[in-house]
Image (cartoon, rainbow, N blue to C red):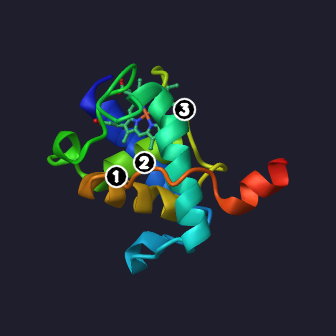
C-alpha cells in the first residue's frame, strides 16, 4: 500500500473519531481502570500475540516491541489498531477496544509491554 493511501486511511479514521463524537480521551492521557488494564494486557498478549508473536517479537505481523516501534508515529499505530489495515491480515479492533484503550496500548507497547497477569479474576470466575 502506498504511503499516500495509508495516510488517507489514517486521516479517515481520525476524522470518523472526530465526527462520530467519540471522545479523544488520549488527549487527556486517560488510564483504564486496573481490572480493564489487566484484561487489555491479556488481550494483547493472547490475541495480538497470536499474530505478532507471544513475546511480541513478530510472527505473521511485525514486532510490537519498544525498539521496533520507536521511530513510528503513535497516531498511525493507534489508527492501525482501531481501523486495521485493509488488504492485510491486521483486523480492526474498534468495538473490542475503544480508541482511548488503543492509545493506552500503544503507549504501553512503546514503553515495553507489561507481562500477562492472566484473565481478570472476574472473568475466570464467570467462566467456571
Ligand atoms: C490476524 C493477525 C493479526 C492480529 C490478531 C493482530 N494483528 Fe496487528 N498486524 C498484523 C499484520 C499482518 C500487520 C502488518 C500489516 C501491514 O502489512 O501493513 C499488523 C500491523 C500492526 C501494527 C502496525 C505495526 C507497524 O510496525 O507499523 C500494529 C501497531 C498492530 N498490528 C497492533 C496490533 C494489536 C495491538 C493487536 C491486538 C489488539 C493486533 N495488532 C492484532 C496482523 C495481526
Residue in the picture at 55% in, 36% down = 47
Which residue is tagged 2? 79
* Numbered badge on residue 91: 3
* Residue 82 x/y as whole percent: 51, 47
In this rendering, would 56 be left or right of 119?
left
Circle 2/circle 3 CB separation < 8 Å = no
The Cα–Cα distance between marks 1 and 2, rounded to whole angstroms, is 19 Å
Is residue 98 visible in this depiction of the protein? no
- Queried on whether the Cβ of the residue with tag 3 lies below 8 angstroms from ligand 1, the answer reads yes
Q: Which secondary structure lies at badge 3?
A: loop
Q: For residue 92, what is the image quadrant?
A: top right
Mark 1 Cα-neighbour bin, 10 Å: few <14, some 14–19, many ≥20 = some
* Residue 60, picture quadrant: top left
Q: Residue at x 40, y 51 (%)?
A: 115
Q: Nearer the viewer, mark 2 or mark 3?
A: 3
Numbered label attached to residue 60: none
Q: Residue at x 42, y 60 (%)?
A: 103
Q: Earlier in the sequence, mark 2 or mark 3?
A: 2
The quadrant in which the N terminus is found is: top left
User: Quick one: SS at disc 2?
Assistant: helix
How far apart are the alpha carbons under marks 3 and 1?
A: 20 Å
Q: Nearer the viewer, residue 68 or 42?
A: 42
Residue 16 drawn at (x, y percent)? 54, 55
Residue drawn at point x = 51 percent, y = 42 percent: 83
Q: Earlier in the sequence, mark 3 or mark 1?
A: 3
Crowding at dot 3, Cα within 10 Å, few <14 / some 14-19 / many 20+, comes out as some
Q: Residues within 10 Å of mark 2 (few under 14, many from 20)?
A: many
- Report how many numbered discs are placed on residues in the image: 3
Amino acid at each position: 500500500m502506498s504511503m499516500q493511501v495509508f495516510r488517507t486511511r489514517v486521516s479517515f479514521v481520525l476524522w470518523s473519531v472526530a465526527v462520530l463524537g467519540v471522545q479523544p480521551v488520549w488527549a487527556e492521557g486517560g488510564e483504564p481502570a486496573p481490572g480493564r488494564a489487566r484484561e487489555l494486557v491479556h488481550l494483547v498478549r493472547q490475541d495480538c500475540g497470536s499474530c505478532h508473536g507471544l513475546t511480541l517479537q513478530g510472527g505473521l505481523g511485525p514486532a510490537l516491541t519498544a525498539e521496533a516501534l520507536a521511530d513510528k508515529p503513535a497516531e498511525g499505530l493507534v489508527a492501525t489498531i482501531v481501523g486495521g489495515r485493509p488488504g492485510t491480515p491486521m483486523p480492526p479492533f474498534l468495538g473490542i477496544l475503544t480508541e482511548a484503550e488503543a492509545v493506552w496500548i500503544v503507549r504501553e507497547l512503546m514503553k515495553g509491554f507489561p507481562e500477562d497477569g492472566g484473565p481478570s479474576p472476574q472473568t475466570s470466575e464467570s467462566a467456571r
